[in-house]
Structures are given as structure tokens and as C-alpha cells.
Image (cartoon, rainbow, N blue to C red):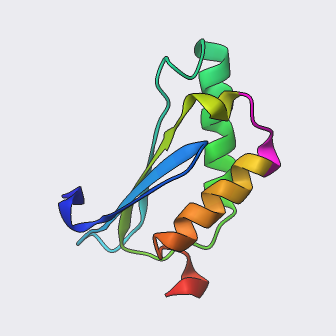
Amino acid sequence: MFQQGRHNGGRLVAVRSAPNEVGITRLAYSVSKRVGKAVIRNKVRRRLREIARALPLTEGFDIVVTARPAAAAADFWTLKAEVELLLTRARVLENQV
């Protein structure tokens, strides 16, 4: 499914996106054990969810956000800036399409 989609990577996260036939945007978050222990992984996951919740995403995409180990040490605003940049490059923000 993601063969026809886009992949954008940064220092803190990587974003894969592909159009879907459902008509709604679905998000998934992948935070591996390389990021840290459970408390840290959950903290990163909560931050990623909050960042995506506040963004105007275009409908009809499947998006997978994968956290890299450096995301554990980053503050919220740095993480938000990188996620916004990568989603803009992926062309899934409403004002970009």
C-alpha cells in the first residue's frame, strides 16, 4: 500500500503517507524500544498524537509516524516543528493541497 505513497524522514521522526479509498485520514504511531523505556515511549506517543490532533490534515490518507531515538530527548515544540515540516513535504496538510 505504501509503495505508491511518500516517505519523508527527519532527525526526530519519519512520516509515510499514502492515499486511501476510505475517504478519512487514519494515523498510526510507531515508537520502538530503541526510543526508551515504556514511560518515555508513551510520552513521545502522547506528544505525537497531540501534534497531529491540532493540525488540519487532508482527508483520505493513511499516515504512519515513526519516532526515532532522538525524539525522546526533544522538547514538544521541536518535535512539532519537525512533524509539521514532514507533513507539509508529504502534502497532507489542508493548506498545501
Q: Residue at x 46, y 54 (%)?
A: 15
Q: Percent x, y for residue 38? A: 59, 14
Q: Residue furthest front?
A: 11
Q: Percent x, y for residue 53? A: 64, 58
Q: Which residues are magenta?
A: 73-77
Q: Main secondary structure of the magenta part?
A: loop
The correct choice, above or below, for 68 with respect to 16 in the image is above
Q: Residue at x 50, y 19 (%)?
A: 34
Q: Residue at x 61, y 46 (%)?
A: 49
Q: Residue at x 69, y 62 (%)?
A: 54
Picture quadrant where residue 11 is located: top right
The correct choice, above or below, for 66 with respect to 53 in the image is above
The correct choice, above or below, for 33 with respect to 63 in the image is above
The correct choice, above or below, for 23 with respect to 69 in the image is below
Give the camera-side residue of 53 and 41: 41
The quarter of the rendered structure image containing the N terminus is bottom left
Tag count: 0
Q: Percent x, y for residue 25? A: 42, 65
